[in-house]
């Protein structure tokens, strides 16, 4: 049974109140936060108002998230609740409205328990780029939890929250899910409204959920998925009932193993653990077929041209006038821009703005940005032709185990390479999920399932079948004594 159902049963039997559930999670937060720093904001006044609001609703079947806490990545706008993007430039930003996903969660009775840590503006793979200090991996406090949605992933891994939202531009939901032993889904581009998500790279960004159990992930996805006229990239599509696909057989499904994503650069320990995951898939009656995705080799440079170009444009608004921190001692406009941005942004964000501005500048646009958009089309076509032969594709989520804090932060290229297996999915716009598939030396390893556009139901179906045979959802980290 999923955690949502478990809590709802207790509500129905009147064995526990909404306040008691929230207090239990707040206690977990109090215990874990000094060790992991998953949250940037937990505002007790805000939570008190939300408890009262939900207590005023009458619990019924339609309120699928009634009295359930959800942790939110701090680049998703929450009305009246600090939203910093882990950047000094937005250190005091209190949004005047809710993102569409937040509106939908609240409408279904959810309670936003806090805002989680991330790499500044979601740029990074370790949560070390947060201006407010890194998040630690609860399985080994000297290691990173992945990123950029590291805080949301850790909140699930520790049990500080049963559900969380993150954003995934190049792997930022799936990679931290893999590093912390939880499930993370990046939906099809256009399935979940990005209205109120602070933009990093608009043609790639998607909001998606984290959970410990597939049932819970299906329920929260149902709430946030579906057309929103306020987001011009939202697609007019009515999602199926995701819970309906759980429990159905996956026998006879064909799953592609792209040799390019298993051969080069994947650590032996990852391959070793995933070998038993492949056996589980065979036990489920799935046929594993070797395939080739020849263009994924170009995904990394393509991504770093497109993502940085879009970032340089999106981040222009933080000029100390429209938005963001302002250095008040400047005498003219240009120095106000320069000094405010210079002091407000961290070094990775500056690096991306410079790279993106260069790729978009006259004389280089055709050679870099335009070319990258063409390669992107080839990558998408590669996936499309693969999906004519197979139902789904699998790969390791990350080529490496969770690494030590500080180990890669000095070398951007080394950090960028971490996302080599998640980035192709964003460029193609397709959905993918990372599911815990085993442990090596008590460090979690995730398996990534990728599917065609709008195959979230299938991804949930296979993940559910897989989790039935390989279930780590009851396994919690015990690095902190007494917890
Ligand atoms: N690590 C990748 C980057 O730094 C992806 C980040 C993300 O998905 N938000 O761009």
Image (spheres, rainbow, N blue to C red):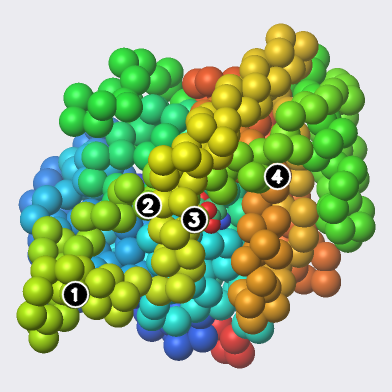
Estimate the spatial distance between the alpha carbons at disc 2 and disc 3, rounded to whole Å. 8 Å
Query: Which of the numbered marks, if any, corresponds to residue 479?
Result: none
181 sits to left or right of 213: right
Q: Position of residue 302 (x, y in %)?
A: 60, 39
Whether 332 is drawn above or below 457: the answer is below
Mark 4, secondary structure of its residue: loop
Estimate the spatial distance between the alpha carbons at disc 1 and disc 4, rounded to whole Å. 41 Å
Q: Earlier in the sequence, mark 4 or mark 3?
A: 3
Residue for badge 1: 335
Circles 2, 3 touching at the beta carbon (< 8 Å): yes
Q: Earlier in the sequence, mark 1 or mark 4?
A: 1
Residue for badge 3: 355
Query: Which of the numbered marks, if any, corresponds to residue 421?
Result: 4
Circles 1, 4 touching at the beta carbon (< 8 Å): no
Q: Residues within 10 Å of mark 4 (few under 14, many from 20)?
A: many
Q: Residues within 10 Å of mark 2 (few under 14, many from 20)?
A: many
52 sits to left or right of 125: left
- The residue depicted at 85 percent of the width and 23 percent of the height is 291
Estimate the spatial distance between the alpha carbons at disc 4 and disc 3, rounded to whole Å. 22 Å
Mark 1, secondary structure of its residue: helix
User: Which is in the foreground here, disc 1 or disc 2?
Assistant: 1
Q: Earlier in the sequence, mark 2 or mark 3?
A: 2
Q: Which picture quadrant has residue 248?
A: top right
Q: Nearer the viewer, residue 247 or 313?
A: 313
Q: Nearer the viewer, residue 368 or 393?
A: 368
- The residue depicted at 53 percent of the width and 62 percent of the height is 124
Q: Earlier in the sequence, mark 2 or mark 4?
A: 2
Estimate the spatial distance between the alpha carbons at disc 1 and disc 2, rounded to whole Å. 19 Å
Residue for badge 2: 312
């Amino acid at each position: 049974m999923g955690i949502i159902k478990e809590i709802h049963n207790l509500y129905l039997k009147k064995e526990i109140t909404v306040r008691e559930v929230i207090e239990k999670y707040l206690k977990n937060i109090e215990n874990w936060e000094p060790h992991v720093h998953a949250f940037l904001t937990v505002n007790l006044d805000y939570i008190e108002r939300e408890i009262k609001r939900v207590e005023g609703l009458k619990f019924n079947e339609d309120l699928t998230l009634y009295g359930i806490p959800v942790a939110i990545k701090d680049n998703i706008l929450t009305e009246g609740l600090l939203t910093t993007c882990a950047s000094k430039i937005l250190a005091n930003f209190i949004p005047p409205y809710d993102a569409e996903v937040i509106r939908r969660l609240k409408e279904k009775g959810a309670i936003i328990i806090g805002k989680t840590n991330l790499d500044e503006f979601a740029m990074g793979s370790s949560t070390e780029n947060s201006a407010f200090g890194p998040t630690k991996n609860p399985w080994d406090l000297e290691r990173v939890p992945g990123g950029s949605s590291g805080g949301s992933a850790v909140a699930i891994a520790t049990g500080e929250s049963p559900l969380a939202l993150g954003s995934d531009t190049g792997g930022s939901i799936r990679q931290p899910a893999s590093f912390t032993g939880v499930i993370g889904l990046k939906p099809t581009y256009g399935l979940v409204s990005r209205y109120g998500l602070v933009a990093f790279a608009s043609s790639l960004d998607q909001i998606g959920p984290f959970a410990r159990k597939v049932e819970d992930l299906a329920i929260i996805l149902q709430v946030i998925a579906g057309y929103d006229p306020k987001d011009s990239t939202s697609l007019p599509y009515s999602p199926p009932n995701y819970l309906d696909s759980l429990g159905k057989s996956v026998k006879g499904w064909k799953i592609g193993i792209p040799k390019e994503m298993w051969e080069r650069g994947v650590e032996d320990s990852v391959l070793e653990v995933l070998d038993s995951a492949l056996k589980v898939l065979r036990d489920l009656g799935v046929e594993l077929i070797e395939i080739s995705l020849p263009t994924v080799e170009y995904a990394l440079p393509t991504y770093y041209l497109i993502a940085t170009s879009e970032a340089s444009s999106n981040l222009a608004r933080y000029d100390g006038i429209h938005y963001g921190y302002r250095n008040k001692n400047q005498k003219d406009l240009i120095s106000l821009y320069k000094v405010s941005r210079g002091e407000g942004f961290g070094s990775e964000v500056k690096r991306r703005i410079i790279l993106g501005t260069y790729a978009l500048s006259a004389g280089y646009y055709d050679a870099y940005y335009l070319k990258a958009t063409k390669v992107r089309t080839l990558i998408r076509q590669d996936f499309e032709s693969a999906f004519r032969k197979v139902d789904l594709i699998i790969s390791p989520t990350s080529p490496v185990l969770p690494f030590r804090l500080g180990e890669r932060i000095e070398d951007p290229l080394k950090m960028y390479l971490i996302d080599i297996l998640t980035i192709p999915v964003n460029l193609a716009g397709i959905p993918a999920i990372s599911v815990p598939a085993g442990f090596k030396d008590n460090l979690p390893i995730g398996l990534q399932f990728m599917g065609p556009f709008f195959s979230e139901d299938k991804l949930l179906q296979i993940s559910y079948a897989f989790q039935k045979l390989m279930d780590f959802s009851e396994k919690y980290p015990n690095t902190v004594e007494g917890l």
